Amino acid sequence: MILAELMILWGHYGFMYKQLHLWADGSLMLILMTIGTTLQTHFSIALMEGEPMWMMAPKWQRKLSFISALSSVITFVA
């Protein structure tokens, strides 16, 4: 599962690099979305591995990560 997640992230990088010509010639929104996607991928991998620091993180921190991921998906779909 982790390998699939990393392959999707690298696919995202490849799409932004090749198809969108270096993040649409430096579009700040696309660059920020890539940074957010990368962070969410790392958070997801930490949860899948059962990383103790992430599993024992304060509730507000885990909730903030969930809200960030949800808003990212809603923005993408919209």
Image: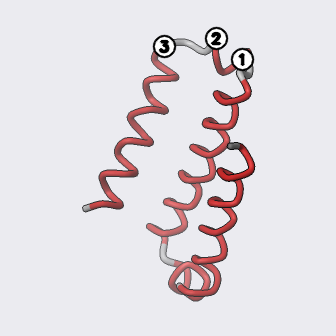
Residue beneath label 3, please?
Answer: 59
Q: Is residue 23 above or below residue 33?
A: below
Nearer-N-terminus badge (1/3)? 1
Label 1, on which residue?
Answer: 53
Occupied quadrant, residue 31: bottom right
10 to 37, vertically: above or below = below
Residue type at tag 1: Met
Write the residue at 32% across / 57% down.
Answer: 75
* Figure quadrant of the N terminus: top right
The residue labelled by disc 2 is 56
Placement of 78 over or under 46, stated as above or below: below
User: Looking at the image, do the residues carrying marks 1 and 3 touch, with CB atoms under 8 Å apart?
Assistant: no
The colour scheme of the drawn protein is secondary structure
Depth check, front residue: 55 or 25: 55
| Quadrant location, the C terminus | bottom left
Q: CA distance from mark 1 to mark 2?
A: 5 Å
- Mark 1 in CB contact with mark 2 (< 8 angstroms): yes
Q: Which mark is residue 78?
A: none
Picture coordinates of residue 50, whole percent (x, y): 71, 21
Q: Residue at x 64, y 59 (%)?
A: 9
Q: Examine the image and state in which quarter residue 25 appears.
A: bottom right
Tell me what residue is drawn at x 66 percent, y 76 percent.
14
Q: SS at mark 3?
A: helix
Counting from the top left corner in percent of width and height, residue 48 is at 67, 30
Residue type highlighted by circle 2: Met
Seen as rendered, the residue at the extreme left is: 78
Amino acid type at circle 3 is: Lys
Identity of the residue drawn at 66% across and 21% down: 54
Helix, strand or loop for disc 2: loop
